Structures are given as structure tokens and as C-alpha cells.
Image (cartoon, coloured by chain):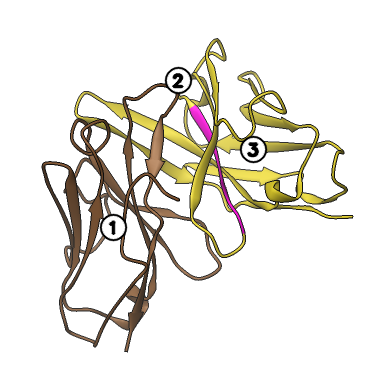
Chain colours: A yellow, B brown
Amino acid sequence: QVQLVESGGGVVQPGRSLSLSCAASGFSFSNYAMYWVRQAPGKGLEWVAIISYDGSDKYYADSVRGRFTISRDNSKNTLYMQMNSLRREDTAVYYCAREVVTAMGSWLDPWGQGTLVTVSS
Amino acid sequence: QSVLTQPPSASGTPGQRVTISCSGSSSNIGSNTVNWYQQLPGTAPKLLIHRNNQRPSGVPDRFSGSKSGTSASLAISGLQSEDEADYYCAAWDDSLNAHVVFGGGTKLTVL
């Protein structure tokens, strides 16, 4: 079945770096744009970064631009997020999600189970 | 502060019908379709409604969506205890550097 599995979360000190991965299975990964969406504790959803199906286009939320880098390896069916200069406000569960695009609209489905990133000294 | 506006909470008793509103603007809901996500406690968001009113396979027909102008609504009829969850609306936004925007979420309590 279509599945996304994140990994790489953990506790990291402010200013340090962390790398997240999202392994995709059950679909043609190279045909889909992918998202990272995060959710701070007790808060709502916030898109963080987007990468096009071939990795040629990348977009970032203002809150992470210049510090986070999204990338993908279509040969490994894997999405990545390199997070540098982490701040306490980056503490959140990070989800990867597939963007489904049709002529009538787009949506995110499925979502991974999420990986928790805690930025704390 | 979220781009799309949802009430923070809603409630109903089993069997009741509840609605959750989602208000946006011309650059998001006004010009793009609306999706709804259900997040059960301790789990990841799951697609509930796409393209305003389309249910993915496996979603009960108790859930329905609608859109008018710059607002959208999610209706849940025959409320069940397992419907207790957070519900998020979302839409793509045509403004500069904005892609998907979310509502702040509505916590639905089944009394």
C-alpha cells in the first residue's frame, strides 16, 4: 500500500543540525511533488518545504528559508530535510506528505506517521 | 495565526449533526478547492475530504464538505464517539510564496 515513513527526529541543541528522511513505498515516488509539514506541540499544521517531482523546484516557508534544505533521491524513493541552525521554535512533529494533483485541485495524501524534533539545551 | 479561520472547538452528542466552518480569502478558498483533514488523537493527519466535497475511498458518507465563495464547511452527521478528533481545512494559496495554507484546526468533542 501507499506508505510514507519518516525517521531522523530527536533532541538537538539550539544552533545545531539534524537531518530527516522520509521513505516512500507503494507508488511511483518520482512522479509526485512532496511536502514537509510540521506541527508544534498543541498547535496546528504549518507547511515547511515543498520539492517538485524531479527536485528542480523547491519552496520554503519564511520561517525556515535559509536554514532548512529539502531534497530527494528518486532512485532511493526517499525525501530528505536538512535542518541547520535549529531554534527552539522549530520543535515540532515533522510529517512528510505526497501531493496529489488533478485538473480539479490538489491535496496531500498520504501523510507519514511523523517524527518528533525537539530543540532544547 | 493561521491563514484560514476555523472555530477552535465544536461539540455534539452521538447521532447529532455538527458543522465546522472555514473562512479564507479570494487568493485561497476563493480560487482553489478546499480539503479537510482529520487528526485522531496521537496520530498523523488523514485526508477526509478533497476538492471541496469528494470523499476518498473508505471515508463514511456521514462526512460531507461544501464551499461557497471564500468559505467552506465540513458537516458530520450521525455523530459517533470515534469522530472525536481535530479537523483542519486547507487550500492552496495563489499569493506570493504561499502554497498550501491551513486552518488553525477545530477540536471536535463528542459529549
Classify residue A80 as left or right of residue A44. Answer: right
Q: Secondary structure at mark 1?
A: loop
- Residue B20 lies in what quarter of the image? bottom left
Tell me which segment is drawn in magenta. A34-40
Inspect the image, locate mark 2, and give the three-letter code of the amino acid beneath it: Asn
As rendered, which of B73 and B76 lies closer to the eye? B73
Percent across and percent down for residue B74 are 21, 59
Give the number of the disc on residue A22: 3
Percent across and percent down for residue A72 are 63, 22
Instruction: Give the alpha-carbon distance from disc 3 to disc 1, as whole Å.
Output: 25 Å
The answer to whether tags 3 and 2 share a subunit is yes
| Residue A39 within the magenta-colored segment of the rendering | yes
Residue ID for mark 1: B58
As rendered, which of B91 and B6 lies closer to the eye? B6
What quarter of the picture does the C terminus of chain A occupy?
A: bottom right
| Residue B46 within the magenta-colored segment of the rendering | no
Give the number of the disc on residue A31: 2
Inspect the image, locate mark 3, and give the three-letter code of the amino acid beneath it: Cys
Q: What residue is at 35 percent from the left and 80 percent from the top?
A: B109
* Camera sees residue A1: no
Q: What residue is at 17 percent from the left and 78 percent from the top?
A: B78
The answer to whether tags 2 and 1 share a subunit is no
Q: Residue furthest front?
A: B1
